[in-house]
Image (cartoon, rainbow, N blue to C red):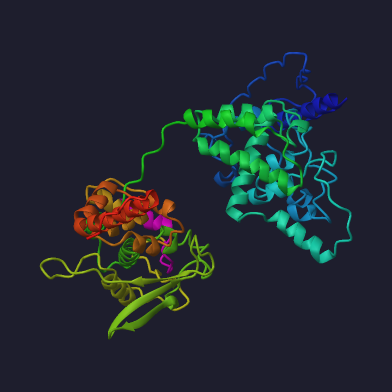
Amino acid sequence: MDSELAHAKLQARLARLRKEDGTSSPKTAPPLASPQQEAPARPLAPRTAPSTSAPALARKGPHPSRKRKVAPIQKALGPAPRVPAANLPFAHEYIDSPIFVAPTSMPACHHLAWSSSCYAHITYNSKEILAKDRLVAAVPPASVPRLPRPNLPWSETSNELFRQALAHPNPESTMSAAGSSLKSLMLWCDLNGIPDELRCPWDTTVLCRYIAELGGRYQGKLSRDRLSHMKLWQSIHQIPWTADDSAIEPFLAAAKLLAPPAKHKRDPYLTDHLVSSLEHTNPNDPFDVAWSFATSWGHSQAMRAGEFTAESVPKWSPKFNVTAGALSEIFVDGKVKYMVHIPWTKTTKELGADIPVDPLPPLEDGSPHPACPVFWLKQHLRINKPQPMESLFMYTPSEGHRNSARRPLTKPAWMSRTNALLVAAGLPPLDGHSIRIGGATQLLLNGVPIKIVQKMGRRATESSFALYWRYASIVISEYTGNMKIRSAPVLRAFSGVSCLLLRASRLELGVAAPSLV
């Protein structure tokens, strides 16, 4: 009965599409073949010349020569329906004491492959339900057994805290990654006809086959991360994990062995790259001056590109981006030093960080260093004059630009100018994160202690800091070459300890111990 209803819906939809295309009317349209019959070929519509009376702007949609790229998985399932956001069950609607409850109705689905799935609303409506909300929004049916809970008279405050802890067990970035993993696995289940009963709790065989298909296509860490994301999804809804981890472990190991070769490490943006790029800039152009200050300062402090640039002009916000009012002067030993407070970082979040603008030592001939951040800071303040509530890297485009309004320095504009200058200097273009990698590498090459570089870069652990090392052999040789050999004191102390141990052992055996002198 369900298949006949779905077949009728598909037939009506195809007739409506043909009517809109003008290929045939609903009366003359060939009937849609049933699942047991072979579908007839659809005749192509004759190409007609465009009407000369209609204005040129009346045409809607993309140009016929521009083909829209469709993902392979979307080709197999067809386009997803656009359901109004008001008809979708969002995460906050699931929060009901004492745990999340499933929605009473689901959006209408048009494809036979996933029309019966109770998770279609989080799989095929990604624009209405964000990735960070999918784990909460994908509520398993009430028939799925939950963890036993004692029937106690909990207070409303306790229930609210309990719901908040379940809905936000991890940071937003982790929840977004887990939501993407859940969507990918649900799509794979739809393509392979996996019923909902084997999706929650997850069946061991289903997970093994999914991990086996990931092997050889992605890094092995991806399979392990997605498995942990599925465990997180079930724990949010208080569903016990029944899959056999010992049976899944061999497939995780195989996925790691069959993983494709790792990508080439990003090359560092060193001081030589910056000096060569500065030779092709205009020291009086507002944009080039803002770029020079941002790049020289970010490189000298091993900063992330997002810490001194904005994602876009409309998305610039003083909550996340540095303002000119955050620049301050401090006096140390009678000398003026500049300090900038950035409001948000990846590790400290809203606490931000105070980053100095330190000058670079002069060259060997005594001339100032061309990449000195203090010089470019003064040049930027003189030419662009950013106001206290504006971006510290605010500038006015030069004459001839299509938009002459003042704007903050954005990451796309900064990255485009960086690569253009590198190409002009005869150097290959680099990635945006190369400035952070190159800044840390340059500090190590200059002899700055490793702990200081790790602290300057605001890196949480030494393992994460080690990923940014480039030219590690040169750095290690610099440290080992300057190391002082203290052989005599070490050998003397070792000999003393050895004699003490030998004396104690001989006393136990009743043998006369030798003198330590």
Lateral position of residue 344 relative to residue 497, left or right: right
- Is residue 442 depicted above or below 369 in this figure? above
Residue 82, image x and y in percent? 71, 43
Which quadrant would the N terminus be assigned to in this image? Answer: top right
- Residue found at the far left of this picture: 365
Which quadrant would the C terminus be assigned to in this image? Answer: bottom left
Residue 113, image x and y in percent? 73, 28
Task: Give the residues in magenta.
Answer: 403-419
The residue positioned 77% from the left and 28% from the top of the image is 10
Lateral position of residue 515 relative to residue 393, left or right: left
Residue 150, image x and y in percent? 86, 52
- Please tell me which residue lies in front, 179 or 127: 179
Can residue 22 be seen? no
The image quarter containing residue 488 is bottom left
- Is residue 143 depicted above or below 480 in this figure? above
- Residue found at the far top of this picture: 37
Lateral position of residue 314 relative to residue 429, left or right: right
The residue positioned 65% from the left and 47% from the top of the image is 127
The image quarter containing residue 293 is bottom left
Q: How many marks?
A: 0
Lateral position of residue 114 relative to residue 388, left or right: right
- Is residue 107 depicted above or below 218 in this figure? below
Check if residue 205 falls in the magenta segment. no
The residue positioned 19% from the left and 54% from the top of the image is 481
The image quarter containing residue 358 is bottom left
